[in-house]
Amino acid sequence: MKRGMKKYLLLAAFALGAINAHAKEWKDIRIGYEGAYPPFSSIQPDGTPVGFDIDMIHALCAQMHANCTLVQVNWDGLIPALQAEKIDAIVASVAITAERKQKVSFTEKYYNAPRRLVVPKNSPIKDATPAELKGKRVGVQRGTLADKYANAYWVPAGVQLVRYPTQDEVFLDLRSGRIDAALQDATMAYAAFLSKPDGANYKFVGAPLLGTTPEQKTLLGEGYGIPVRKSDDDLRQQLNQAIEAIRANGTYQSIEKKYFDFDIY
Amino acid sequence: MSELQQYLPALIRGAEVTLVLAVLSVALAVCVGMAGAMAKLSGSRPLVSLATAYTTLIRGVPEFVMMLLVFYGGQIILNRISSALGFHAPDVDAFVTAVFTIGFIFGAYYTETFRGAILGVPRGQMEAARAYGFSGWLAFRRILFPQMVRLALPAAVNNWLVLLKTTAIASLIGLHDVMFIADQAGRTTQAPMTFYLAACVVYLLVTSGSTACLARARVQLNRGVREGRLHG
């Protein structure tokens, strides 16, 4: 058995070697972005794109010493444009999901917006655990990952879940005191509420919810990756190495600090 | 409101794109429509069936679907063909795609408009022209066309107004027209209504402007003719 395994490993190593020998190094890459999802991606009046996604593109391209062309594509057109070879990669906060994996292949995540609990600054709630929140009213936007997570792990422990059609309404009711806490995507809570005057008297409480068990991790997703065509595995590996490199040399962290005061990886 | 001021130059650039796109598309649509109407009235069976197939197909498929099919589907087909032949496929341009798609879609509507107009000119007019020894082309130019234009104008103007608004779907394939700019600016500033209203104003200005111009053209064309009225 052991010998058999060794043979396969050796074969795999040869195969990898062969792939590497033929792998093309991408020098000219056309990258699609969206431009309508602040603070990740938006377009300034003069037409220049800005945001976390855009800074990521520049950092990754500089790391790869690649000549990148940024192509604006509407959200619905991003994957069709990738398949039609109008672009080679997408950096547009695309969540890694099983459904999308059937059509494209993803790099490792380049960020993973965790869910986080928001409460008033003077709230008695000190942590985002079912025990701490028992009997409390927690608001979520219906159908979001926050809703699914709280429904699965908090409601059985006696937390009262209040669902709203939009995130704006969650924050409005948090301000009016109808709910004790709000659970949602941390990057969005920060960009749309906590960093604005309306959210001045509110704060995050507890650790970001990333999931501890495999089921929780599956429910919360694997974060946001960079889709490339399935046939371009060389590009996917090149991007993975670049993500790792900018995480290691601090470029990632300095970009992150421009937009968020907490870790979103 | 300051957001609107910031994005005003971008909106004006977008309005220019919309206008150029609409004018080029309508020029193509009128040519296609004229050819289509001639084909339908030619009496030659293959030409008639070709033109009928064209108007049936085009008028039956939503513009939106057609645009995406041409832009993405067309690129995929082009990629396949050129990789089979061993060269790199050219990139299908969004503006060119939009002009051709909108031009061909509205060509079908203009075909019907022009066909109706040609049929509205009494047969005796052409017969008389031929009896005076006019060649086919001369009879068309001097007798049929001037009368037909007068009959076609109201429906043609209607088609033009619909075409102008249809150009908004070009924003879906990433063309930076006024709708696209308004949408992006609205999302970026989180004030979508301001920018959608601004886009409305642009479309309204162009449509009302062109309606006024075409009303004058109609007066010119109707010289020497009295329009029929219903007796009240």
Image (cartoon, rainbow, N blue to C red):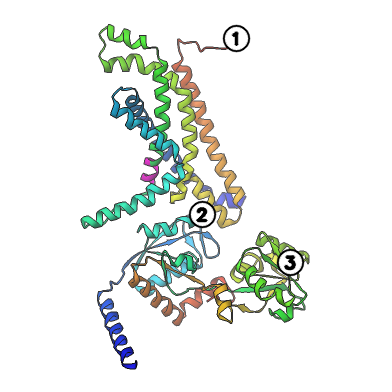
Which chain contains the residue that carries disc 1? B
Task: Give the structural element (helix, strand or loop) at label 1.
Answer: loop
* Labels 1 and 3 share a subunit: no
Residue drawn at (39%, 73%) of the image: A239
Instruction: Say which of A161 and B162 sits in front.
Output: A161
Height in image: B71 above or below B164?
below
Q: Earlier in the sequence, mark 3 or mark 2?
A: 2
Query: Is B88 within the magenta?
Result: no
x and y percent of residue A35 in the render? 49, 59
Instruction: Say which of B185 and B96 sits in front.
Output: B96
The residue wearing badge 3 is A174
How far apart in space, not on screen, are marks 1 and 3 (Cα)? 68 Å
Q: Which residues are magenta?
A: B95-100
Q: In the image as oriented, which residue stretches furthest toward the front?
A: A1
x and y percent of residue B54 in the render? 36, 35
Task: Tell me the mark number nearer the camera, choosing from 1 and 2.
Answer: 1
User: Which labelled disc corresponds to residue B231?
Assistant: 1
The secondary structure that dominates the magenta segment is helix
Determine whether, in the image, residue A168 is placed left or right of residue B155.
right
Instruction: Tell whether label 2 touches label 3 (CB within 8 Å).
Output: no
How far apart in space, not on screen, are marks 1 and 2 (Cα)? 57 Å
Amino acid type shown at disc 3: Leu
Determine whether, in the image, residue B199 is placed left or right of residue A72.
right
Mark 3 Cα shell of 10 Å, populated few (<14), some (14-19), many (≥20): many
Residue drawn at (47%, 48%) of the image: B171
The residue wearing badge 2 is A45
Q: Is residue B26 visible?
A: no
Task: Tell me the mark number nearer the camera, choosing from 1 and 3.
Answer: 1
